[in-house]
Image (tube, rainbow, N blue to C red):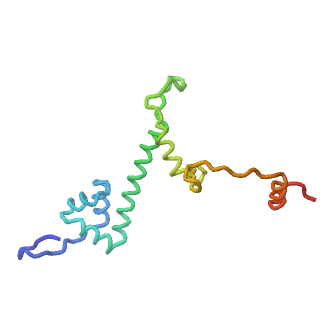
């Protein structure tokens, strides 16, 4: 909103989606900086996004692009930067791999491939002792599970 000649609030004209996207890109998706660039407060930007889905999608797109850029940096941290000779042979590291970043990426992005950290949720980290199964018990379990001699 802005003041008119009578010193009362008037609604600022909503920008085009193109200019909204450009400002979001220049401000890295930061709502406060984008609002300042338009000369409005944060609430006005949220109203624009609430009133028009294209504005909300523009914010989501810009923040998604930021996440993509961060993943590029995280990948470099996780894998390191190898140094190679003229023949392409590994000679050392310009930047060593970061094991913590590698573990983080695998535990978050690699879940579908089975890269998850296991967590003990039954014993609270304490060892428990289980009774040993007798041979009879083992045979009974095999029968229940369809393992063993099939006739």
Q: Is residue 128 above or below residue 92?
A: below
Q: Position of residue 111 (x, y in %)?
A: 56, 53
Q: Nearer the viewer, residue 132 or 108?
A: 132
* Figure label count: 0
Q: Position of residue 87 (x, y in %)?
A: 54, 23
Residue located at (36% from left, 58% from top): 62
**Which quadrant is the C terminus positioned in?**
bottom right
Q: Nearer the viewer, residue 124 or 19?
A: 124
Looking at the image, the residue that sits furthest to the left is 6
Residue located at (14% from left, 70% from top): 2
Left or right position of 106 against 15? right
Q: Nearer the viewer, residue 85 or 77?
A: 77
Q: Is residue 124 above or below residue 80?
A: below
Q: Quadrant of residue 49?
A: bottom left
Q: Position of residue 136 (x, y in %)?
A: 85, 55
Q: Position of residue 3 (x, y in %)?
A: 11, 71
**Which quadrant is the N terminus positioned in?**
bottom left
Q: Nearer the viewer, residue 146 or 48?
A: 146
Left or right position of 19 against 83? left
Residue located at (53% from left, 26% from top): 90
């Amino acid at each position: 909103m802005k003041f008119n000649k009578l010193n009362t609030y008037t609604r600022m004209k909503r920008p085009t989606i193109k200019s909204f996207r450009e400002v979001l890109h220049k401000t890295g998706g930061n709502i406060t900086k984008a609002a300042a660039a338009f000369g409005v407060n944060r609430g006005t930007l949220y109203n624009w996004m609430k009133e028009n889905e294209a504005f909300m999608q523009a914010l989501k797109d810009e923040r998604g692009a930021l996440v993509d850029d961060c993943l590029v940096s995280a990948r470099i941290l996780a894998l390191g930067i190898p140094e190679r000779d003229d023949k392409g042979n590994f000679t050392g590291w310009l930047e060593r791999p970061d094991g913590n970043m590698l573990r983080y990426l695998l535990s978050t992005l690699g879940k579908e491939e089975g890269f998850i950290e296991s967590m003990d949720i039954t014993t609270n980290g304490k060892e428990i002792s289980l009774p040993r199964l007798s041979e009879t018990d083992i045979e009974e379990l095999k029968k229940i599970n369809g393992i063993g001699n099939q006739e």
